[in-house]
Amino acid sequence: MPIGELIRNLRKARGWSQGRLASEINKMFGTGLTREYVSRWECSKVVPGAYHLRHLSAVLDVPPATLEGEVGRRAFISDVAATAIAPVVASDLLSVGFAARLRGGPSAEQWEATYGTDYMSMGAADIQRRVAGELVVVQQQLDDPRLWSVAARLMTLYAKTFPGSDGAKAVSWYRTAVRAADRSGDERARVWVRGRAAIALGYEGASLGVADILADQAMAISEEPSLGLVNAVMGKAHAAAVRGDRATAERLAERGRRLFDRAGSHEQTSDYAVPWWRMNVFLSLLLARLGDERGAVDAQERAHRELPVSLPRFATHLEMHRGLMLARSGDRAGGVAYAQAALDRLPPGKHSLTLRMLMAEVQA
C-alpha cells in the first residue's frame, strides 16, 4: 500500500480531517505543519522522511515500521531467522527447510486439518517456537496458491506471540499475513486474517488505528457472514470501547451478535473457531470496558457454562475481566489484587501476551 494511502486510511479511521491531523502533530511536537502538507503526503506528491514519520507514528498510534513500507520476501526471511527460530540451530533449520522442499511438505488438506488445535492451551513462547518451525516448512511450498492461505493463517497466529503494548512487531506480521492472504486469492482467508488481527489488537487495546483499518478492509471485502467478519466487527467494537466511544461499541457489538448467530462455529478448541463461549469472552471484556457490569457478568457466566475444561487460560481471562470491573468501579486495589490472583493461579507456562496486557490494563 502506498504510504500516502496508508496515512489517509489511518487519518480517516480516527474520523479526522487533514487539518485535524496537522493540528494534532503541531500540538504534540510544535512543528508548524499545514493541512496542505498533509494533502501532499496523501496524494504521494511528497514522501514524509524519518522526522515526520516519527510524528505520524505517535499521533496515529502506529509503529514507524508500519509507515515505512512493505515487508519484502528477503525481510520476511531474515525476520524469521533472527527472531522466530533463534532457539533452533542454524544447520537444523536449513535441513528442515530443504527437506520440506524436497519432500513437497504436507498437503494443503493436511495443513488445514491441523489448524489452530494445539495453540489454545500453549504458552506464547511454545506457540512462537512451533509456528516458526511450521512457517519454515510452508515457506517451501508456496508454489501452490492454497498454501499462501496456510501461511497467512500461521503468520497471524505468530503475530500474537510478540510483546509490546504498542503492537509494533505484531502489526508488522499482521500486515505480512494480509499480503499472503491476498496472494492466495481466497476471499474467506482474506477476511479471516484481517478480522483475526483486528480482534487481537482490539481485545489487547493495542494499535487501535490499525485494528480499525483491518476491520474495515475485512468488511469491504465481503459482507457474507463468516468467522472472519465476526472477528472484524468485534475487534472494531473493542477499539471503540477502549477509546470511550460507547455508542459505536454497542452498535458494533449488536452487529457482531447477529453475525455470530449466522456464522458461529461448533468447533470448540481451535484458534480458528469462534464458538458461543468464545463470543461471550469477547463480550465479557467489551462490556467490562463499557462499565456494563450486569451485561459483563451475564456474558462471563454463559462463557463459563460452555468453556472446555482443557482451556484454563480462557477461564483466567474471564476472572481478570472481573478484576477490571472492580478497578473501573473505583476499587483499584481490589481489582488489581483479584486479577493478579487469577493470573497467579494459571501455570506460568500457559501465560499469554494478551493476559499480560490485560493485567496492565487493570493496573492502569
Image (cartoon, rainbow, N blue to C red):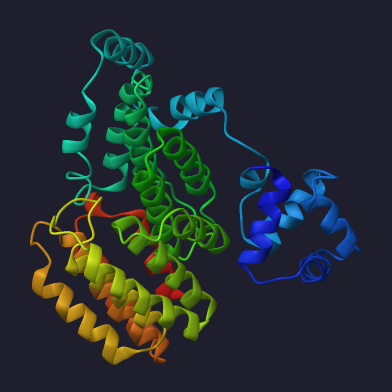
Q: Quadrant of the N terminus?
A: top right
Q: Is residue 73 left or right of residue 232?
A: right
Residue 203 versus residue 182: which sits nearer the camera?
182
Q: Quadrant of residue 105?
A: top left
Image location (x, y in percent) of residue 155: 39, 39
Q: Which of the two residues, 295 or 273, is positioned nearer the viewer here?
A: 273
262 vs 5: above or below? below
Question: Would you say residue 342 is visible in this rendering?
Answer: no
Residue at horizontal 61%, vertical 36%? Answer: 70
Residue 226 picture location, percent across and down: 30, 58
Residue drawn 22% across and 44% down?
Answer: 116
Q: Is residue 289 left or right of residue 13?
A: left
Question: With respect to residue 97, does 330 lie above or below?
Answer: below
Residue 275 falls left or right of residue 165: left
Q: Position of residue 203 (x, y in %)?
A: 40, 65
Return the residue nearer the eye: 73 or 204: 73
